Amino acid sequence: MIGRYTRPEMGRIWELENKFAIWKEIEVLACEAQAELGQAGITREEAQWIRDHADFTVEEIDEIEKVTNHDVIAFTTCMANYIDADIPEGGDKPSRWVHYGMTSSDLGDTALSYQVTQACDIIIEDIKRLGETCKRRAFEFQNTLCVGRTHGIHAEPMTFGMKFGSWAWALKRALTRMEEARAVAATGAKVVMIEAGADEIPDEIMYAGIVKAHEEIRKQIDFINQIVAEIGKPKMEYDHAQFNQELFDDIVANFMDEAKAAMDTDDKTVREQRWNEMIDHWHEKYLEQYPDMDQYLEEFTYKFQKKIVKAWLLEGHRVDGRAQNEIRPLAAEVGILPRVHGSGLFTRGQTQVLSICTLNTLSAAQKLDTIWEEEEKRYMHHYNFPAFSTGEARAARSITASSSSLG
C-alpha cells in the first residue's frame, strides 16, 4: 500500500508483518488440527511446542528468500529455526510438522481471504458511521431548501435533508452488499473462507448457497483478470525500510548486560528511565561513527527488548519477575466516594481504575439514532484517561485525546 493513499489501519493489513503473522497462525492451527485428528503422527505436545515457539522476522525471511526464491519456503524455514532453536542436538524436530500436507496455495489463499475480511470490517464500520451521519443530517436539514439538479441544469426545489436522506438509503444498500460480500471470501479456483450466521438449515441448502456465491465471484474475478491482461501495469516494487543490522548486532553484543539490568524491574517508569540512559551510552559510543543512528533507535529498542523478553520467557519468568502462571497483585474496593450512587476502585499492579455509578429511571435510557430500527441502551459506560495518569503533561481538551483516552 502507498502510505499517502491509505489510512494506517488499512495499510497495516497489507504489510508483510501482518501477512506473515496470519501465515504463522494458519500453520500453527493446521498442526493443532492434525494433532486433534490423530492421523498424521504429530502429538498434542508437539503442536503445543510449535504454538509456543513459532516466530519470525520479516528481515530474516527476506534474507532466506534471496537464496530460495520462494516466499513460502523462506517463511517456513525462518519459523522452523525458531521452533527448533531449543531442541537438543539429535532430537526430533517439531518443525517437521509445519506445512505438513499443505500447498503454498492453501496457505496463501487462506491468508489472503482473511486479509480481505479484515479490510471489509474497516469498510463496513466506515459505511455504518457515514450512514448514521447522513441520517442525522437528513433530519437536521429537512426544512432547508436548495435547488435540485438534473442533467446539469437547475431543476425544481428540494430540501438539503432529502439529499442526505437519499445518501443514507444508498449507504444502507451498500452496507448490505458489503456484508454479503464479506460472508464469502474466495478466489477463482476455490472457496477458501466462509462466514455466515443463520438458524439451522439443511446442509444441501447451505452448500447450494456457497456454490452460487462462488459462481458469481468467478465472474468478477474473470473480469478483473481480463482488465489486468489488457491494461494492467506491473506490480510496484519498493525498498524495505532501512535497518542497520551491523550496528544493531554490535549494540546487542556490547550492551546485553546493561539492557537486561534496565529491563529487570516491575516498574514501567523505572524501566523506561533506565533504557533511555542506556541509549545515551549508545550515543557516546556510536554517534560519531553512525551519525544517522537515531532513525533506527525505535526499531533497535523493539528488537532488543523482544530478544531479552523471549530469552527470559524460555527460562520460565517474565520481565517484571513474575512466573508464567503468576498474575499481578489484584485489589478491589467499593464505596470509595460518599456522594455518588456507587463507586469502586480496581487495582492491578500499577494500574488503577476508579468507577462511578449513577442510577436513573428507565425513561432516561439512551436512544440509538441509526438508519435502522430505533433501539435503546440502558447501560452506558463512559471513561476517560487523563494525561497525568501516565505522567504526561498535555492539555485536557478532547481534541488532543487519543482513541484510547475517551470512550
Image (tube, rainbow, N blue to C red):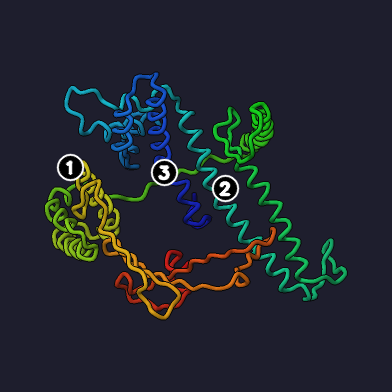
Kindly indicate the quadrant of the structure image that contains residue 165.
bottom right
Which is more N-terminal, label 2 or label 1? 2
In the picture as drawn, the residue positioned furthest to the right comes out as 156
Q: Which residue is mark 3?
A: 16
- Residue 120, label in figure: 2
Q: Secondary structure at mark 2?
A: helix
Which is more N-terminal, label 1 or label 3? 3
Mark toward the viewer: 3 or 1: 1
In the picture as drawn, the residue positioned furthest to the bottom comes out as 339
The residue located at (50%, 57%) in the rendering is 7
The residue located at (61%, 41%) in the rendering is 197
Q: CA distance from mark 2 to mark 3?
A: 19 Å
Q: Tag 1: Cα neighbours inside 10 Å, few (<14), some, or many (≥20)?
A: few
Kindly indicate the quadrant of the structure image that contains residue 148.
bottom right
Amino acid type, label 1: Glu
Q: Secondary structure at mark 3?
A: helix
Kindly indicate the quadrant of the structure image that contains residue 33.
top left
Q: CA distance from mark 3 to mark 1?
A: 30 Å
- Residue 294, label in figure: none
Q: Which residue is mark 1?
A: 315
Q: Tag 3: Cα neighbours inside 10 Å, few (<14), some, or many (≥20)?
A: few
Amino acid type, label 3: Leu
Given residues 138 and 151, the one toward you in this image is: 138
Q: Is residue 330 above or below residue 36?
A: below
Horizontal and vertical percent position of residue 204: 66, 26
User: Does 313 sit left or right of 3 as displayed?
Assistant: left
Which is more N-terminal, label 3 or label 2? 3
